């Protein structure tokens, strides 16, 4: 499912009107119908029949006023509070305002004490103050209405995007609607799917307002929401007459003194995602410890220095690399002097490589090396690790995660998986993917190690590196969600997530996992 920015959706609107002859009034009519449809459904679930619509002076307010007319026709008691004087409404929004008045819908301009009473006694509030073109923060009467709506204790249905949320980044500066649900038009918006916007949007419904498929599925919208259907279409088949060699030979280079668990978890992640053969290359100093914990994988000792892999370990790795289909490196390697030499050697090995954790940290001052990898490369940094690679504070990375991942992917000529709430994956060509799975229970050590192994496993089974990255992220988060549903988030372990990967895979394979948004499009 494609995900649009404010600029992209404005271009789709323009082309729908100019190239496909769809009047703007028709788009607004369909938008209002869809908002009313969801509003009636919410009222049916929650009870009641009193609705207050908060309307801005732009097209978002027009959508709300059209919805008010359809709700009135459905027998709902509906009133509208205008955040601007009627004289400020223009274009399609003005026509919608006049039609609402003619239909007998009570209209009042914000600013009286009656506003709070109306909102507190409503069964549902519709937020149609600002749409995707808004740039915050919200001020004036609209800000007062947002605070009153949030403080009313009544559910809010947002039109297109909660007012105050940035459509392209999900940022929320100042007053922002906290919605129970959002009806978004044509395509979901980036700000609905990344935090904090994702939390403020509630349940997201994607409405059909009449965009031609040639526009709504156009390559000019290069961001995608990862859905169970996308993952299911890529899951490797397990044929009855297959053998372990059919499911990939994964080489993992990991571990050091004090960080043995990372190597074990990466191996478990690879095996639990279906890898046929996993070789784990670790420093000789920790080999006995790791070998006692890795039963199904094949541990292999490497020359070490001070408890970490030594630079001359590359010679020992040559034979293992030759027998592998894909390499994963980084978990628990440490930042010892020899590690950088080993990682740089792996970049030249000519095999697909997944690089994480210390595999990235040791290149912080030599990040341009990543762009010279001789085979497809996936890097899986968290914001701090990416920040060190691109010399940017982690907080700045978080302000626009998609832009940061895209920029790094282009700079380093590789697939970038930026970990965090709503993991994003970007390619050098500009495509990006948002994974909707995962929860705060994953905020504990070892989760990234499992993900590294899972991605390498999928590459070994034949997925291209980008597909392996977004499928791996989706399944990894889903495994954690299944645990949270069973027994909560607190105390969740990375090893448990690894062990739930087969359950997550089977759930997707059987079509039992629901889409992250409700698609109302025909």
Image: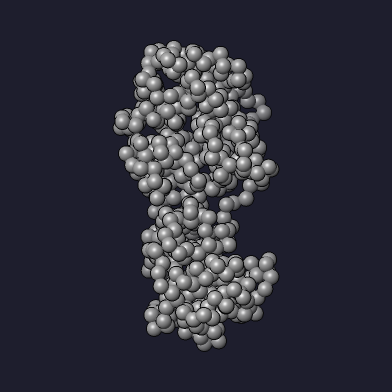
Rendered location of residue 203, percent (x, y): 58, 58
Identify the residue at horizontal 37%, vertical 47% (top origin).
Answer: 396
Identify the residue at horizontal 44%, vertical 12% (top origin).
Answer: 303
Above or below, 515 against 115 in this view is: above
Rendered location of residue 376, percent (x, y): 41, 31
Number of marks: 0
Above or below, 401 against 139 in this view is: above
Rendered location of residue 10, percent (x, y): 39, 64
Here the colouring is: one colour
Instruction: State which quarter of the image contains the C terminus.
Output: bottom right
Q: Is residue 458 left or right of residue 409?
A: right
Identify the residue at horizontal 55%, vertical 87% (top origin).
Answer: 104
User: Looking at the image, can residue 352 be seen?
Assistant: no
Above or below, 315 against 28 in this view is: above
Identify the residue at horizontal 50%, vertical 47% (top origin).
Answer: 422
Q: Is residue 38 left or right of residue 5?
A: right
Location of residue 518 by image quarter: bottom right
The answer to which of 22 and 46 lies nearer the viewer is: 46
Residue extending farthest to the front is: 113
Rendered location of residue 215, percent (x, y): 44, 59
User: Looking at the image, can residue 255 be seen?
Assistant: yes
The answer to which of 114 and 91 lies nearer the viewer is: 114
The answer to which of 73 and 481 lies nearer the viewer is: 481
């Amino acid at each position: 499912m494609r995900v649009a920015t404010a600029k992209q959706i404005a271009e789709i609107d323009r082309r729908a009107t100019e190239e496909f002859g769809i009047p703007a009034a028709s788009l607004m009519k369909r938008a209002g119908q869809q908002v009313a449809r969801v509003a009636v459904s919410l009222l049916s679930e929650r009870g009641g029949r009193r609705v207050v619509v908060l309307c801005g002076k732009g097209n978002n307010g027009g959508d709300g006023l059209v919805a008010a007319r359809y709700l009135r026709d459905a027998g709902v008691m509906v009133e509208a509070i205008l955040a601007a004087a009627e004289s400020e409404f223009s274009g399609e929004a003005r026509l919608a305002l006049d039609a609402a008045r003619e239909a007998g819908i009570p209209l009042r301009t914000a600013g009286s004490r009656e506003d709070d009473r109306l909102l507190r006694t409503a069964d549902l509030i519709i937020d149609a103050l600002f749409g995707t073109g808004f740039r915050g923060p919200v001020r004036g009467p609209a800000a007062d209405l947002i605070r009153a709506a949030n403080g009313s204790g009544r559910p809010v249905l947002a039109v297109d995007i909660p007012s105050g949320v940035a459509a392209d980044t999900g940022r929320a500066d100042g007053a922002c609607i906290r919605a129970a649900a959002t009806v978004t038009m044509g395509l979901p918006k980036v700000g609905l799917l990344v935090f904090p916007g994702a939390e403020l949007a509630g349940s997201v419904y994607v409405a059909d307002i009449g965009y031609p498929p040639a526009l709504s599925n156009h390559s000019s919208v290069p961001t995608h929401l990862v859905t169970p259907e996308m993952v299911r279409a890529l899951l490797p088949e397990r044929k009855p007459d297959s053998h372990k060699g059919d499911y990939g030979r994964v080489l993992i280079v990991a571990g050091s003194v004090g960080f043995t668990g990372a190597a074990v978890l990466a191996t478990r992640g690879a095996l639990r995602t279906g890898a046929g053969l996993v070789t784990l290359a670790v420093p000789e100093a920790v080999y006995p410890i790791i070998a006692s914990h890795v039963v199904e994988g094949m541990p292999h000792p490497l020359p070490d220095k001070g408890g970490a892999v030594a630079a001359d370990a590359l010679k020992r790795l040559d034979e293992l690399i030759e027998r592998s289909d894909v390499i994963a490196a980084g978990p628990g390697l440490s930042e010892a002097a020899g590690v950088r030499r080993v990682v740089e050697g792996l970049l030249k090995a000519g095999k697909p490589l997944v690089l994480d954790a210390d595999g990235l940290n040791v290149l912080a001052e030599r990040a341009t090396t990543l762009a010279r990898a001789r085979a497809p490369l996936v890097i899986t940094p968290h914001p701090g690790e990416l920040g060190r690679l691109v010399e940017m504070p982690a907080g700045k990375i978080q302000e626009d995660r998609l832009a940061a991942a895209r920029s790094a992917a282009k700079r380093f000529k590789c697939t970038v998986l930026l970990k965090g709430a709503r993991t994003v994956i970007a390619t050098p060509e500009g495509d990006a993917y948002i994974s909707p799975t995962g929860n705060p229970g994953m905020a504990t050590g070892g989760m990234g190690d499992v993900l590294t192994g899972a991605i390498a496993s999928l590459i070994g089974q034949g997925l291209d590196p980008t597909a392996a990255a977004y499928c791996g992220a989706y399944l990894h988060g889903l495994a954690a969600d299944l645990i949270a549903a069973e027994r909560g988030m607190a105390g969740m372990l990375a090893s448990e997530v690894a062990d739930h990967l087969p359950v997550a895979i089977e759930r997707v394979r059987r079509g039992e996992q629901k889409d992250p948004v409700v698609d109302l499009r025909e």
